[in-house]
Image (cartoon, grey):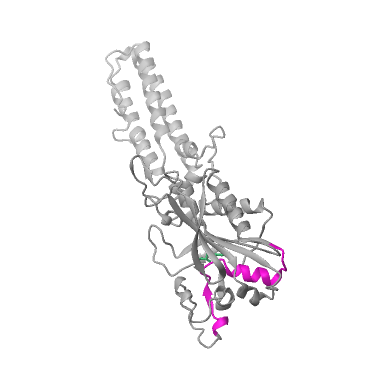
Amino acid sequence: MPYSVPRLSDFSPAVLDEAARELLSALDQESAAVDSESDWKLYRDRWMARKNGALTQLNDLWLKAAPGQNKRDVGQRVNELKIKVEQTVEATLSRIQSGTSSSRLAAERLDITLPGIRRSIGAEHPVIKTMNEIIGVFRNLGYSVEEGPEIETDYYNFEALNFPPNHPARDTQDTLFIAGQDTKALRDRLLLRTHTSPVQIRTMQKMKPPVRVVCPGKVHRNDAPDATHSPIFHQVEGLAVDTSITFCDLKGTLDHAMKALFGSNVKTRFYPSFFPFTEPSADVQISCIFCDGKGTRDGAPCRNCKASGWIELLGCGMVDPNVYGFVDYDTAKVSGFAFGMGVERIAILKYGVDDIQLFFNGDVRFLQQFA
Ligand code: DAH
């Protein structure tokens, strides 16, 4: 209810005191709410307009209405109130003009006792985290880390790895080629590397045996994205070349690595396979970590291993002597093994992720779970 000057029936000092208190408190309250010049004009008019302003009403309802014997007292009080009203209206305008309205002050007040805004620290992406974990396992075995370019030549991605030009083995790697290079010799044409194996060649070109390296990195394939495929993914390659490395060393190394990554209960199985740059070649399978290799879970066939009890995880083999020919290693003196594993595939198994796309969509709610 906005304040209005009351009609008085009793002009005793006590009643006048109370009425004056009410008027002043309304004056102050309304003043505090004034926030702009247009507010202020309305405020001023409510109190001081000649026609029907509070001061005019004060004159009419209090002074003029007061009986003769109270006139003097009421007159004095009304004068005092007039001065108060004029001063307050004036002061309200100064406050507005000096830009210190109470609401603005409140909005700008700095409360140093409030807690600050905490920005969360980023965390390793689950793919990078898994990649580092894999690298860590091999670092502990004395391997060092080598990297190579993501844009590769046909020579490193294929030819030096014993994929001859036009050999059908090239079809196993759905390659993204860089356009407009038809005038170059085939071996110099650029492509997005389809695997990290070219880093084997680059490493052997710059180091003599003994070599023990892991090569992490991003690779590309011309694959349509779905729950298990992505045109971009990551691999960790391994290469060990020395004077008397055997398939036993390969088995022991990868068996140890799989146990380090998935737990010491995991078994490994080497299954004959083919890669142009290794001979013999094998696919490594681990016993299914979901059904403990039993092939059934809760009485139903295990979906993760298609009830076989085994999950295929990586490719490996003994380095094909033809490859040594490309890097000037003495085939008669050296032997070695190589392996390559998909990082997302390992992360999917370790963390129970059901869609590879989750790694690349950038949804913070997914990524936060690995922080
Ligand atoms: N480069 C192969 C691929 O991407 C994986 C691979 C298999 C790497 C056997 C190796 C190896 O080093 O020896 O399919």
Residue 131's x, y, as percent? 56, 54
Q: Position of residue 84 (x, y in %)?
A: 44, 27
Question: Can you tell which quarter of the image residue 93 is in?
Answer: top left
Q: Nearer the viewer, residue 316 or 357?
A: 316
**51 relative position to 244: left or right:** left
Image quadrant where residue 89 sits: top left
Left or right: residue 135 versus residue 294 is right
Q: Is residue 63 above or below residue 47?
A: above
| Quarter of the image where one finds residue 339 | bottom right
> Residue 174: in sight, yes or no?
no
Which residue is at a point 69% across and 54% down the rendered structure image? 142
Find residue 203 and report its horizontal and vertical position in percent.
Answer: 66, 68
Q: Residue at x 58, y 78 (%)?
A: 155
Direction from residue 188 to residue 44 in the image, left or right: left
- Considering depth in this image, is 84 or 4 the residue closer to the camera? 4
Q: Position of residue 306 (x, y in %)?
A: 37, 52
The magenta region covers: 186-211
Residue 208 colored in magenta in the image: yes
Q: Is residue 349 above or below residue 85?
A: below
For the N terminus, give its image quadrant.
top left
**The residue positioned farthest toward the bottom in the image shown:** 183
**What residue lies at 48% left-to-right and 45% top-to-bottom?**
368
